[in-house]
Image (spheres, rainbow, N blue to C red):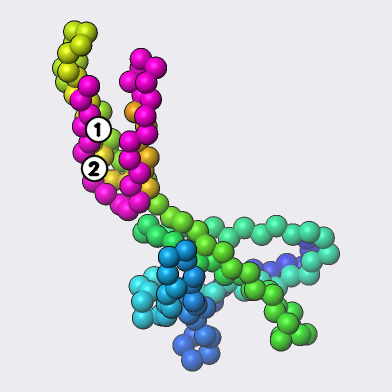
Amino acid sequence: MRDAQLAYRQYRPGFDEPDFKFTMTDDQATAVFDSTKFKRIDDRKYYLRLIVSEPLTFTMPHVYSQSGRYPIKFELSNEFDQDESITRTNFVSVQSTISKMRLTVKPPNAAVAKKVDIVVQLSKGSNIQLEWDFGDGNQTTEHIARKSLSLSLSLSF
């Protein structure tokens, strides 16, 4: 690729129209979002100016600070035909990572046919699937949590 430029500038109120007004349709509901429902971090736009003569792959890294489902929008336009822009949208699902997981077994030594308590404690995470494997060939999927949580589960057998 030759003659490519990447530029950044601050959002100019009154000049630029924010891109975060949209209608989102989900499996369960339709909701309309506008700028009053978003916490402003940085209003920014990235402008690309390039000549493409072969297939192009472009990556724009971004870091989200909270769990959620976020819309992604990319718009291409040509300075000679401003009315014929190409817009693509998609969504990204951002989840909290699991932290401070603790697994305890009480008592640590047990006789055959006696009760053993297995306790899992999590202090952070979202969209978690717990799969129990008892080491004796028995496995089971226990729980799926969809939101960020603190969790303490116990299982006796």
Tell me the CA gap for discs 2 and 1: 8 Å
Outermost right residue: 53
**Proximity of marks 2 and 1: CB atoms separated by less than 8 Å:** yes
Outermost bottom residue: 14
Tell me the number on the disc at residue 120.
1
Rendered view: 143 above or below 13: above
Q: Which residues are magenta?
A: 133-157
Q: Residue at x 33, y 36 (%)?
A: 142
Q: Residue at x 18, y 8 (%)?
A: 111
Element assignment for label 2: strand
Location of residue 119 in the rendering, given as x and y in whole percent from the top left corner: 21, 30
Q: Residue at x 21, y 32 (%)?
A: 154
Q: Is residue 42 visible?
A: no
**Three-letter code, disc 1:** Val
- Is 70 part of what is drawn in magenta? no
Comparing 143 with 98, the one in front is 143
Comparing 39 with 93, the one in front is 93
Element assignment for label 1: strand
Residue linked to disc 2: 151
Is residue 61 found left or right of 121 in the rendered image? Answer: right
Q: Is residue 87 visible?
A: yes
Is residue 118 found left or right of 21 in the rendered image? Answer: left
Comparing 31 with 150, the one in front is 31
Quarter of the image where one finds residue 65: bottom left
**Three-letter code, disc 2:** Leu
Location of residue 41 in the rendering, given as x and y in whole percent from the top left corner: 39, 70
Q: Residues within 10 Å of mark 2 (few under 14, many from 20)?
A: few
Q: Residue at x 28, y 46 (%)?
A: 124
- Is 139 part of what is drawn in magenta? yes
First in sequence: mark 2 vs mark 1? 1
Q: Quadrant of the C terminus?
A: top left
